[in-house]
């Protein structure tokens, strides 16, 4: 890196070749499932060098919760352990900035993509809900909630970051703090997230906060690559055996079939589930299966996000608005 402080030279500096086994060729970078034919040129040229691009990637790899100065097996995802990176809202050095959105002006953490587009698109959708409910008596209009799903352990388990509420401004504020976690371990627990969302929509007598007369809608926003599941394998196999469908993957693909099983259960309980893909590596084969199993597919497909970061926000906003304006129906292409 040119101009390294205190070295008095302009020569390039390299980190030791074998300093860490988890370098660019480890950590499944890039993910060869979502990117089966990657161009390794940029990665090879950047390997073991220090600069803006590699430092940004370093920050993103540790996500919202991991501390680089503590080993992950020592619990570096716990809030009180180690030093979080500057991108994380858990860091005192996180650089917030003000932005004008469809729902008002909010302070956001750094604009990492596609997460920042998700934050802004969610706020746009919530603003439409707010406009549609303007003038209604308190407690009679639509309510919204936000559920996050990462892994299954204590530091990553699905969480209700905003319980059902008619206070749309509070829900928008919750959106501003949504961040991706690290890429260490299994951190896409779609099934567990769906189970938590459905549980939250149950009636109070059943432990939830839902209302008996309300039309219930769940929007699943993901890259469509689950890697953690909650239901025991035998129970998944048993359910598929009793409810066979060509949409399921082969036996043993529990991380995929568990989510498809829950999509089927959503339809049977009259909860509309929309699966929306986001990011360059979205697995639309899986997302389309989710939509078909939930009965919300249009021409056999789930809504299509964008692979272009410049279009993330607008495309997501369009999808969310269509769902909000037509809850429970099939999306118009």
Image (spheres, rainbow, N blue to C red):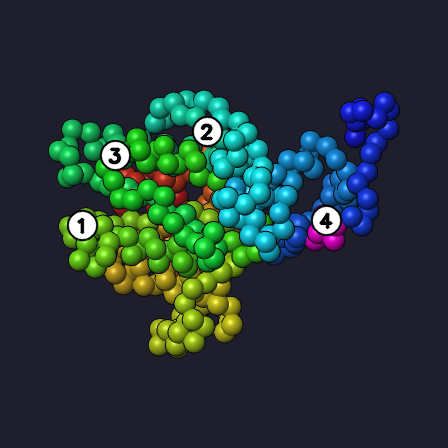
Viewport quadrant of the N terminus: top right
Distance between the alpha carbons at the discs numbered 2 and 4: 30 Å
Distance between the alpha carbons at the discs numbered 3 and 2: 20 Å
Please provide the residue range marked out in magenta.
Answer: 20-26
Say whether disc 3 or disc 2 marks the residue closer to the N-terminus.
2
Say whether disc 3 or disc 4 marks the residue closer to the N-terminus.
4
| Residue at image mark 3 | 167
| CB under 8 Å between discs 1 and 4 | no
Q: Looking at the image, which residue is at 82% across and 44% down?
A: 16
Residue 108: give its label: 2
Residue 211: give its label: 1
Distance between the alpha carbons at the discs numbered 3 and 4: 45 Å
Say whether disc 1 or disc 4 marks the residue closer to the N-terminus.
4
> Which residue extends farthest left?
137
* Residue 220 relative to residue 113: left or right: left
Q: Is residue 22 magenta?
A: yes
Rendered view: 251 above or below 150: below
| Residue at image mark 4 | 23
Q: Circle 1 sits in a helix, a strand or a loop, which is it?
A: loop
The answer to whether residue 213 is seen in the rendering is yes
């Amino acid at each position: 890196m040119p101009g390294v402080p205190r070295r008095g030279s302009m020569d390039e500096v390299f980190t030791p070749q074998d300093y860490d086994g988890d370098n660019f060729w480890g950590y499944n970078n890039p993910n060869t499932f979502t990117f089966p034919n990657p161009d390794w040129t940029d990665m090879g040229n950047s390997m073991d060098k220090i600069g803006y691009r590699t430092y940004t990637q370093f920050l993103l790899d540790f996500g919202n919760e991991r501390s680089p100065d503590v080993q992950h097996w020592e619990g570096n995802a716990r809030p009180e352990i180690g030093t979080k990176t500057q991108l994380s809202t858990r860091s005192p050095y996180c650089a917030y900035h003000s932005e004008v959105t469809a729902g008002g002006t909010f302070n956001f953490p750094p604009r990492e993509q596609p997460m920042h587009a998700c934050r802004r698109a969610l706020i746009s959708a919530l603003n439409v809900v707010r406009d549609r409910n303007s003038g209604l008596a308190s407690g009679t209009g639509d309510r919204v909630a936000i559920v996050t799903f990462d892994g299954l352990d204590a530091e990553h388990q699905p969480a209700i970051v905003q319980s059902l509420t008619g206070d749309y401004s509070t829900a928008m504020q919750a959106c501003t703090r949504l961040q991706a976690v690290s890429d260490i371990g299994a951190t896409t627990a779609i099934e567990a997230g769906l189970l938590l969302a459905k549980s939250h929509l149950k009636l109070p007598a059943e432990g939830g906060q839902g209302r008996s007369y309300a039309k219930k809608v769940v929007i699943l926003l993901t890259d469509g690559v689950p890697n953690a599941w909650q239901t025991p394998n035998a129970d998944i196999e048993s359910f598929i055996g009793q409810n066979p469908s060509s949409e399921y993957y082969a036996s043993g693909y529990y991380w995929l079939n568990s989510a498809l099983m829950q999509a089927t259960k959503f339809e049977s309980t009259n909860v509309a589930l929309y699966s929306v893909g986001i990011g360059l590596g979205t697995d639309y084969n899986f997302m389309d299966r989710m939509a078909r199993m939930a009965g919300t597919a249009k021409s056999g497909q789930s809504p299509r996000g964008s692979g272009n970061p410049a279009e993330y926000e607008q495309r997501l906003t369009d999808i969310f608005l269509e769902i909000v304006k037509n809850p429970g129906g099939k999306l118009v292409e």
